[in-house]
Each structure stands twice: as C-alpha cells, then as structure tokens.
Amino acid sequence: MIEKILPPEVASEEAFDDLTEVTLFPEEETVIARSVDKRRREFATARGCARRAMATLDLPPVPILPGERGAPAWPPGVVGSMTHCDGYRAAAVALQDRVRTVGVDAEPNGPLPEGVLEAIATPPELEWMKNIAGDASGVCWDRLLFSAKETIYKAWFPLTRLWLNFEEAVVTPDPDAGTFTARLLVPGPVVDGRTLSGFAGRWMADRGLVATSITVLAEV
C-alpha cells in the first residue's frame, strides 16, 4: 500500500499484522526491555519492515535505535521513516545521495478524538475542513490532516534537528489528486543550496487506513 505514494528511489515494506520472526539486536532489546507486549510487537515489526526495505537496497541489517527526540537513528548514508498504528506497520528507506529526507505516517481512517483537531489545526485548515465536511469520499479528513502533520515533522526533523509544532505548517490537501502541500510558517531548511518554504506530499486511503508521505529528492 505505502509504495503507491512513494517514488522509486524509496524502498518500503509493510505488514498488516505483527511479524513473529523478527530478531532484535541486543541494543534494541535493551531499549524495549520494560515495554508492554503491544509496544514490543510494534517496535519489532517496524524494524523488521525497515530491515527488509534496507535489504532491497543491498544494505546489511543493523540496529535501528531511537535517537534524538525519538527519531530512528539510521546508519550513515541512509534516510528513512517508520510508522505503526492498529493493524499496520511500515518503513520507508532510501540512500541519502538520492533522497535527502523521507517521512511516512499511517492512521486508522476514523475521526480524531474530540478536541484534537482544534489542537493541531491552523485557521486556514479549520476553514478547509468546514468546506469539505460531508463529502462522499469516505476519507476522514481530520485524520488525514493529523497524518500529514506527523509526516511533515518526520521529513523536517532530519534536515533541521529542530522541533516543529503542529501550528507551524499549513496543510492543503488536494482531494482529487491524492496530494497535499505543506507551507512552513517558520524558516525552512536549506537543502542542496535552496531554502525549502514547504513540502509536497502524497496521500491515500485504503483498507481502513489513511497514509501520507513526503520525499525530498536530491538535486542532481
């Protein structure tokens, strides 16, 4: 599923149930040792997906530990992103000389809990949500917005090593094209000599999920 919204430069793997055959590295075992079973299974399956994706790029399996602010610490020369929610885990991985950053997120295609939309959305986004309310697409647009905001942060952080609040980017989905734009309200990162004022993303809804992605390709 996730591969449909990623470019060919990005390798991805996904699982709709937990992988039982994943062997964690000792360093990963230490990180997850005191976690509940659900968290342990999510952690292991996401890393199993990541290692499968890395293998398609001829990269060896390595520990993938939580780094700064919990972001995955990928090996040198590699960029990637992982996501997990009920019934789904996925990882996207690329070589840094071809892809500068990648972010992915998946969420259940259901309404956000009460009060969450108001906490994450900017006034233009709330207006957009009001205008599209009641459409027949079957997409929970508030959940899609939340997923896009998560993906923006996952793409942003490796480039800046800085926090990005929900209200510091404005998302505008295109319901027909399966794309979205993210306009940054703070100074953007410099990538290959150009300052990014925002990101271009893709989204899809399938199998009871909404998924979003952002990829910034290297300038060649």
Image (cartoon, helix red, strand yellow):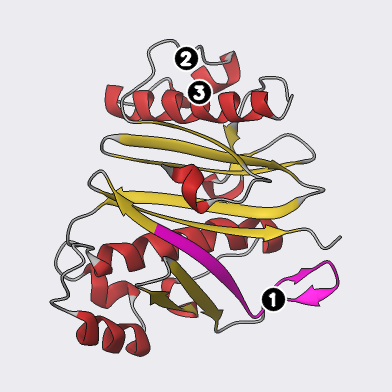
Residue 32 coordinates in the image, percent (x, y): 44, 24
Residue 61 coordinates in the image, percent (x, y): 66, 20
Query: What kind of residue is marked 2?
Result: Val
Residue 219 coordinates in the image, percent (x, y): 82, 63
Residue contact at pointers 2 and 3, CB within 8 angstroms: yes
- Tag 1 or tag 2, which sits nearer the N-term? 2
Q: Is residue 102 above or below residue 91?
A: below
Q: Which mark is residue 48?
A: 3
Element type at mark 1: loop
- Between the residue at mark 3 and the residue at mark 1, the CA separation in whole angstroms equals 32 Å
What residue is pinned by disc 1?
Answer: 196
Question: Is 90 on the left-hand or right-hand side of 121?
Answer: right
Q: Quadrant of residue 86?
A: top left
What residue is pinned by disc 2?
Answer: 22
Q: Is residue 187 magenta?
A: no
- Tag 1 or tag 3, which sits nearer the N-term? 3
Question: Is 166 on the left-hand or right-hand side of 218?
Answer: left
| Image quarter in which the C terminus is found | bottom right
Please state which of residues 20 and 7 is positioned toward the viewer in this rendering: 7
At x 63%, y 24%, the residue is: 63
| Image quarter in which the N terminus is found | top left
Element type at mark 3: helix
At x 16%, y 61%, the residue is: 113
At x 50%, y 43%, the residue is: 3
At x 58%, y 15%, the residue is: 25
Q: Which mark is residue 81?
A: none
- Tag 3 or tag 2, which sits nearer the N-term? 2
Stretch of the chain drawn in magenta: 189-203
Question: Is 136 on the left-hand or right-hand side of 187?
Answer: left
Q: Is residue 202 magenta?
A: yes
* Total count of labels: 3
